[in-house]
Image (spheres, rainbow, N blue to C red):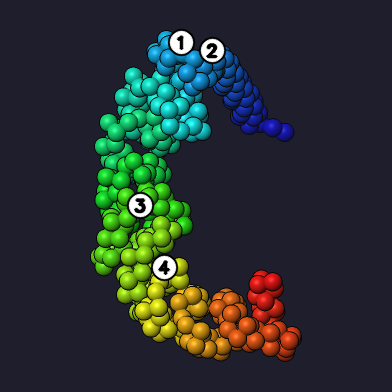
Amino acid sequence: MWSESALGFLVAGMLLLCILLVVFSAITLVVRVRTTRRARHWSMLEDRWEPAVLEALDGARTPASVRSLVRERDALLFVEYVTRFARRVRGMERDRLAEMVAPWLPRLAQRLTHRDEATRARAVQTISLLADGGFAGRLVRALDDRSQLVAMAAARALARPERTEFAPQLLRRLPRFAHWRPSFVSAMLTEMGPDAVPELLAAFADPEKPAEVRATLADALNALNVLEAADIAAGLLGPQRNRDLVAAALRLLRNLGRHEHVAAVRALLTSQDDMVRSGAIAAFGALASPAELELLVPALADPSHWAALEAARALRSLRNGAELRALAKRGGDHPHAIIAAEVLAEST
């Protein structure tokens, strides 16, 4: 038999669960109503703004006349709406969009100190798209934001050809982005264009810069085809160097090096590191004379697939590919025979 006290606890528990169910249901209903109302409001605003914005982009009406359709309470929503167009247009059309939202950008800039990092990051992106140089100082300060997301948004905003005067500030903060994908960071630096080359070269040559940063700079200079970077890269080759930096230097030398750099590359053909050895073989194949390419014949039997592949590609032109054809004929008798056959097929 249940005691009266146990029965009382059970009833109280069930009542509490019912109350909680009612409360959670009410909260869900309120949230849904608010979301629906917000969606309807947003849809209404889009219907009002879209024709005017499109007409302004075509030059059929002035940006000021579009602003007259925006209530102050919806101003930042309008800025957000215009940002969608700004991501897809350039030149005069983007200038028209910037003029539409110019009076409200100072209010948007206040969000750069918002407690939510996503809000700060969106503010950085919007300002970078729609503001002129007057907000550049705030973007520089955002490089030191406590959030990596916000700092990277600011870095991407500043890594532009029209903002190369901020390259020194950006390059000083590169160690902050050491954990980002190197190819992403180097591509960002490349976007600064030729005017930023002196700053990139100086940073690449700076021995005080972390190896990971210099490796990223090497890839950016490689993409920009900066021939002066080859001498610096050759000086970075050595068994005691950071492997990522050496690999990046070898990639640069493969594309931009000269024959005088062959000696530095040759020293790494027997490196114990597969990645370094593969990069050295590739660079040596691009820079060495036909007579020197004979040194790569033993590399056709390299235990590393990538090293053997690079050797095969380098030897494709030696004696009209005689070594590769001989290796391909061996078939299963040689572990890299299939590589030789593939490389020969690439040239046909």
Residue at mark 1 to residue at mark 2: CA–CA distance: 8 Å
Residue on which the image places disc 3? 194
Residue at mark 4 to residue at mark 1: CA–CA distance: 55 Å
The answer to which of 36 and 309 lies nearer the viewer is 309
Q: Secondary structure at mark 2?
A: helix
Q: Quadrant of residue 305?
A: bottom right
Q: Residue 41 in the image: x percent, y percent? A: 54, 15
Q: Quadrant of residue 178?
A: bottom left
Q: Residue 279 in the image: x percent, y percent? A: 48, 74
Residue on which the image places disc 1? 69
Q: Which quarter of the figure is the N terminus placed in?
A: top right
Q: On the rendered structure, is 329 left or right of 260? A: right
Sort mark 3 into few (<14), some (14-19) or many (20+) by Cα contacts within 10 Å: some
Evaluate if marks 1 and 2 touch, with contact meaning CB atoms under 8 Å apart.
yes
Q: On the rendered structure, is 334 left or right of 215? A: right
Q: Secondary structure at mark 4?
A: helix
The amino acid marked with disc number 3 is: Pro
